DNA sequence: AAAGGTTCCGAAAAGGTTTTCGTTATTTTT
DNA sequence: AAAAATAACGAAAACCTTTTCGGAACCTTT
């Protein structure tokens, strides 16, 4: 039984295509008897209107594109889930691509999707694209009137809607919290050295230090590059610097750091507190459970999808917005409790 | 600058649409001068052939659908990644849906996609669909000649290509390994009580026991339901049963079990060994690191995509195949080393 | 009986593209 | 110079659907 079209039904009954179309759509223009015959036949042959033809006719595919750099990263998985959920609830399908942190794949995908397949795009920049700073493909998108929402890893050079984590506030809030628990010498271990995100968090950290009269010490910021030995870096960091807290800018680094400290028989949080970014699946299950900064990935996805679909469906041009999503500090056992009664927090 | 079509270019130069089409496709039928003018204009205006129109014309969307029950599950994320990777490398886009373990959403999605949007479908059954056993929507798919590949959570009632984990062999292999390390009283903790997958693993477990002359004891199989207290169940399990190994059928349960044993000051693996299923992100980072059964999610995704695309592209009907993917036991510190010199393993 | 209304169906356009087949006009061959 | 070949372009079909408009037949009203 091959795919069946209106044409085939029309031929079967010796009527015109328009008649069949109206019949299956239950139009009052068609007589009851004919409608029933046609509908019965259509049902028996599993007739379903061709979606591609409808898209062409209506000039609307009800589909949005999503490009994430790395789906194995739990944060992006969460965002993706949020996008799918709300897009689906608003009647949109999503066609998804993984740029795999590659500029070329991102470029190819954007070009592929910008040919009428999708009505809009949600994207987070690949690492390579961020490093290169080449966002021409996205500017072309805007020129071609294809709505774009960027999230998390965004570019200032692209004029579009954005949803970003308030990383500055997150760094500030985290540092302030550590200070309140009595920590003074707070180090940062970062594996995301060339991202705007990392810079913002450090800026927030600096602001909190300054506000609390703690001097900023450059030596406390550690950058971990791809093939670096974290163990060694931590040992160097600990050397004569009286560290009492470590902020790790991603979950894996946080857990690794914890394990290294444990292997050195340093007590967490008694001697050194640890806070990690990205509340993923690991932090809850290690011991002591890690205090983490949650970025609310799913919420970000929901927001991005809603903003995009609003723009697709609304007439006229609204101004572009940048939504700043606040983080939450999820306190577990790797940090000390706040001393005394701090009402301002 | 609005979306531009061949029509617009044709109007601009006062030529026909066919001429423009041939010009942008660099046909020899068009004079060099005209071609150059048109191509320049097309490039300047970012002309790209409309993908929807092409799909309609060619009767091929170069798109496949993927339906997974739960993207936050790392196994499915891995499969998804594998699918995207190979589909992309073979020139296909993927349109993805998350059934959220719901029968209704799965049904709706299958119906939506089976209208010409995708050329084939890759699917893993939702929990609810498995429980209900209602797979009519998938049988309709086959009737409508839409290629389908099921993976992991499959149904015997659907006649299609399948890619499944060899769960029987996994249960067998794992149990055999534990026996070789000297364990005798091996318990199983399962949170996937009504899945074929869980049943197969237990069957493999039984076979290994029998082969090694160890008697099967029903009381060692623990089923954890949604709101059950794992702590309590483990306590009951441990009571007077001289357990020396526990197999957990998912990663979270494995980690939870480990933590419960640690809180009871039971030494792992000295007193009790632990093996978990699904080698995710947690097991490596807890201490002791957990020995896990890897299901090779990404490989499964790659296989599924290749099988599907082969079927889409090949003429004539090949027989349906079921690909059995073997698991690997990843030994870490939660199990004892094998005693003596076992050459047969 | 004439005018108006209703019922039921078909023709055709529109959406964008490729491709086949004409149709000219020019050039080459005999 | 006539015939044949080539070059350069256009018309139209095809993919599938919805929708507008038009038309014929019948029915109702004055």
Image (cartoon, coloured by chain):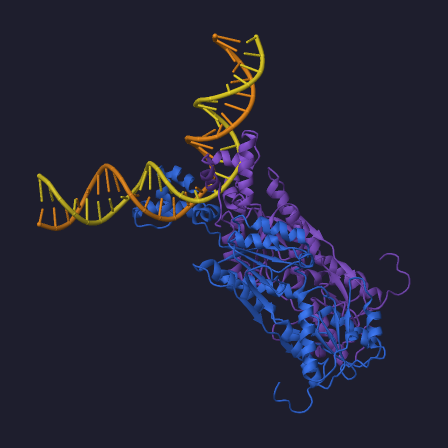
Chain colours: A blue, B purple, C yellow, D orange
The residue sitting at 59% across, 49% down in the picture is A111
Q: Say if B121 sits above or below B203 in the image.
A: above
Residue B259, picture quadrant: bottom right
Q: Depth check: B273 or A173 in front?
A: A173
| Residue A180 point in image, percent of width and height | 69, 85
Q: Say if A4 sits above or below A150 in the image.
A: above
Q: Depth check: A49 or B145 in front?
A: A49
Q: Is residue A105 left or right of residue B147?
A: right
The residue sitting at 70% across, 78% down in the picture is B236
Residue most toward the bottom?
A: A340
| Residue B277 point in image, percent of width and height | 72, 64
Q: Say if A188 sits above or below A12 in the image.
A: below
| Residue A37 point in image, percent of width and height | 35, 45
Whether residue A1 is visible: no
Please state the total of marks drawn on the protein image. Answer: 0
Residue B268, picture quadrant: bottom right
Q: Depth check: A253 or A146 in front?
A: A146
Q: Say if A319 sits above or below A185 in the image.
A: above
Whether residue B27 is visible: yes
Residue most toward the right?
A: B340
Q: Depth check: B333 or D7 in front?
A: D7
> In which quadrant is the C terminus of chain B drawn?
bottom right
| Residue B199 point in image, percent of width and height | 67, 62
């Amino acid at each position: 039984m091959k795919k069946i079209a209106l044409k085939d039904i029309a031929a079967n009954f010796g009527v015109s295509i328009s008649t069949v179309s109206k019949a299956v759509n239950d139009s009052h223009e068609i007589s009851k008897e004919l409608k029933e015959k046609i509908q019965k036949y259509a049902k028996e042959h599993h007739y379903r209107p061709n979606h591609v033809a409808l898209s062409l006719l209506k000039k609307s595919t009800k589909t949005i594109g999503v490009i994430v750099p790395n789906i194995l990263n739990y944060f992006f998985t969460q965002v993706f889930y949020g996008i799918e959920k709300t897009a689906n609830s608003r009647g949109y399908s999503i066609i998804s691509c993984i740029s795999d942190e590659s500029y070329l794949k991102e470029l190819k995908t954007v070009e592929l999707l910008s040919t009428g397949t999708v009505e809009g795009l949600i994207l987070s920049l690949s690492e390579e694209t961020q490093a290169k700073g080449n966002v021409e493909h996205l500017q072309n998108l805007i020129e071609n009137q294809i709505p774009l929402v960027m999230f998390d890893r965004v570019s200032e050079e692209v004029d579009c809607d954005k949803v970003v984590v308030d990383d500055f506030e997150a760094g500030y809030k985290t540092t302030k919290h550590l200070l309140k628990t009595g920590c003074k010498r707070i180090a940062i271990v970062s594996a995301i050295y060339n991202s705007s995100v990392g810079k913002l968090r450090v800026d927030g950290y600096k602001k909190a230090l300054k506000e609390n009269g703690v001097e900023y010490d450059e030596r406390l910021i550690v950058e971990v590059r791809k093939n670096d030995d974290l163990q060694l870096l931590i040992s160097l960091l600990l050397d004569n610097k009286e560290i009492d807290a470590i902020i790790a800018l991603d979950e894996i680094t946080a857990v690794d750091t914890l394990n290294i400290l444990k292997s050195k028989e340093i007590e967490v949080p008694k001697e050194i507190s640890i806070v990690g970014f990205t509340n993923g699946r690991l932090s809850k299950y290690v011991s002591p459970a890690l205090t983490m900064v949650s970025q609310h990935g799913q919420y970000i996805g929901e927001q991005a999808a809603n903003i995009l679909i609003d723009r697709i469906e609304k007439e006229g041009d609204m101004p572009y917005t940048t939504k700043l999503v606040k983080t939450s500090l999820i306190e577990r056992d790797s940090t000390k409790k706040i001393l005394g009664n701090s009402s301002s927090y």
